[in-house]
Amino acid sequence: MRSVLILLVSLSAISLNPQKMNESKEYSRALFASGCYWGTEFYMQQAEGVIETSVGYAGGHVKNPSYREVCTGTTGHAETVEVVYDPELTDYETLCKLFFETHDPTQVDRQGPDIGTQYRSAIFYLNDEQKKIAEKLKSILEDKGLEIATEITGGATFYREQEEYHHDYYQKKGGTPYCHAYKKRF
């Protein structure tokens, strides 16, 4: 019961869209960093079973960093997307595969023209099951000959970006991501 309460508290703290939420359901979370969070969010929002996304930062040492601070590359954070999904409609493995297929996981500290540690490829797992799945998928890609640069790290805190301009960027502006593209890998 305590884990359900913690989940509900953490979900309410990220200002989820109440129209998309069903209070009687239990949702799951995932944290993915794959370059500019606008492109990552774009693909995750289109995935079946995704209830809500938020852009922000994880993996650094500064509490509540601002966009400007993260852009300096000195906070240790990566631009990250928090994905809230309905486990009755999709699962973590499906979303993790989408993560690996919508960016180049072989690039180190960059994605396309965006360069810096804040654009690194990382999975911030939230439990042992997520860690196991992420490591399995990374291993599959490495067995195919890819040199995967994706970090798989636990214990990261997600900080939601406070500037609304960065949320739902491609929904508001139109267009498609400039440094993310789908490529079948599994």
Image: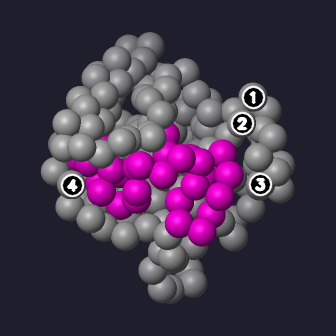
Q: Amino acid at mark 3?
A: Cys
Q: Which residues are magenta?
A: 93-122
Mark toward the start of the polypeptide (1 vs 4): 1
Relative placement, left or right, of 86 versus 170 is: left
Determine the CA span between mark 2 and mark 1: 6 Å
Q: Which residue is mark 1?
A: 61
Q: Secondary structure under badge 4?
A: loop
- Location of residue 19 (image quadrant): bottom left
Mark toward the start of the polypeptide (3 vs 4): 3
Residue appearing at x 45%, y 80% in the figure: 176
- Location of residue 148 (image quadrant): top left
Neighbourhood count class around disc 2 (C-alpha, 10 Å): few under 14, some 14–19, many 20 upward? some
Neighbourhood count class around disc 3 (C-alpha, 10 Å): few under 14, some 14–19, many 20 upward? some
Determine the CA span between mark 4 and mark 2: 29 Å
Disc number lying in front (1 or 4): 4
Residues at circles 2 and 1 in contact by the CB criterion of under 8 Å: yes
Determine the CA span between mark 3 and mark 4: 30 Å
Q: Secondary structure under badge 1?
A: loop
